[in-house]
Amino acid sequence: MSPSTVTAMAAQDHEDQHEHEHQAAHEHGHVHLDEADWERWAGQAEREGEVLLDVVTKAASWASDLRGTAVGPVRHVVDVGSGPGVGSCELARLFPAATVTAVDGSPAMLERARGRAERLGLAERVTTHQAELPDGLEGLAPADLVWASMSLHHVGDEVAALAALRRLLAPGGLVAIAEIAEPLRVLPDDLGIGRPGLADRLDAAGSRWFDELRRGLPGAKAANSLPALVADAGLRIVGSRIAQVRLDPPLADDARRFVADTVDRSRQQWQRHLDADDVAALEVLVDPGDERSVLRRPDVFVHASRELVIAAPA
């Protein structure tokens, strides 16, 4: 990585750090993510989508194979929890006869999605719709494919959300769901900073934070396995698998920035679940002026996995 690239990335990280200071408001009680969070994280979410785009590409191809040709081409795709529209635009590319509706509860994310579609020449086929699951989908046209990636766990009543997606399907339509399989890993076990095993402790802290997030959602119900949720919503599984993205060192600049985003989000969100030594190690890792920073060290990587379930009405 060139010095100029590190300098530019460091400047952006400095800006991002100031943007994230409001996370201190989440120090106590249930975790609550509001529009200010989504607005500040839109850029990070777009980078994450780009780095992990292979999940969308392969899942869409698989869903197309499972759907078959007898029901005709895919004409309408609904991307539920679209975020900044990375997946929406990829789905439009993969299904050239289709319109894609990007659905999200965040105006900032939808604005980002519209901008991305315009830049890619897809503005006529990618539209946006603001809604908070399980409500707000009634006015949408029937969908041949519903893509719900990393969105279901943000809904308190996941069964109600899946039932709403089932009702949205056109005849022969499918729902494709992607949720976390194993925790994202970006750091080696021994960083030469603090105690070894930081990655494992981050996994545990993230799990506790996620439990708090779930408990704080409106209408929250006890979590269940994805297959059980699908069945309870009146859907049947037609395919399931684990999708993985593995990027080994040395990372390209976009993947390295994604690693920096990931570590900084961990620092901001999970620090009250970590001891002081681990927080100090994270401070080093996100310091762009330190040679041990994830922006500079040669041993960071990306290992991500998603549980993919494709379902049809039972």
Image: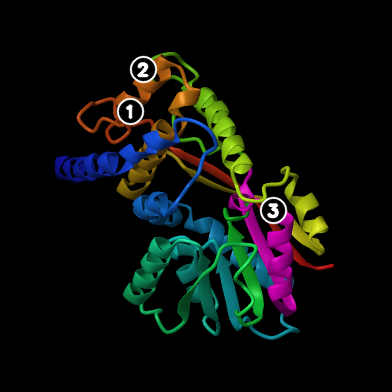
Numbered circle sitting on residue 193: 2
Rounded to the nearest whole Å, what is the CA distance between mark 1 and mark 3? 37 Å
Residue 310: which quarter of the image? Answer: bottom right
Instruction: Count neighbours of disc 3 (C-alpha within 10 A) and say few if under 14, some if 14 to 19, many if 20 or more.
Output: many
Do the CB atoms of the residues marked 1 and 2 lie less than 8 Å apart? Answer: yes
Q: Secondary structure at mark 3?
A: loop
Q: Secondary structure at mark 1?
A: helix
Residue 255 lies, in percent from the top left, at 37, 46
Front: mark 3 or 2: 3
Q: Please provide the residue range marked out in magenta.
A: 153-181
Q: Which residue is mark 3?
A: 157
Residue 172 lies, in percent from the top left, at 75, 78
Q: Which residue is nearer to you in this view: 287 or 210?
A: 210
Q: Is residue 47 visible?
A: no
Q: Amino acid at mark 3?
A: Asp
Do the CB atoms of the residues marked 3 and 2 lie less than 8 Å apart? Answer: no
Coloring scheme of the render? rainbow
Q: Which residue is nearer to you in this view: 39 or 306?
A: 39
**Could you tell which of marks 1 and 2 lies nearer the N-terminus?**
2
Q: Which residue is at a point 45% across and 61% down the rendered structure image?
A: 106
Q: Secondary structure at mark 2?
A: loop
**Could you tell which of marks 1 and 3 lies nearer the N-terminus?**
3
Residue 215 lies, in percent from the top left, at 63, 40
Q: Which residue is mark 1?
A: 285
Residue 240 lies, in percent from the top left, at 73, 55
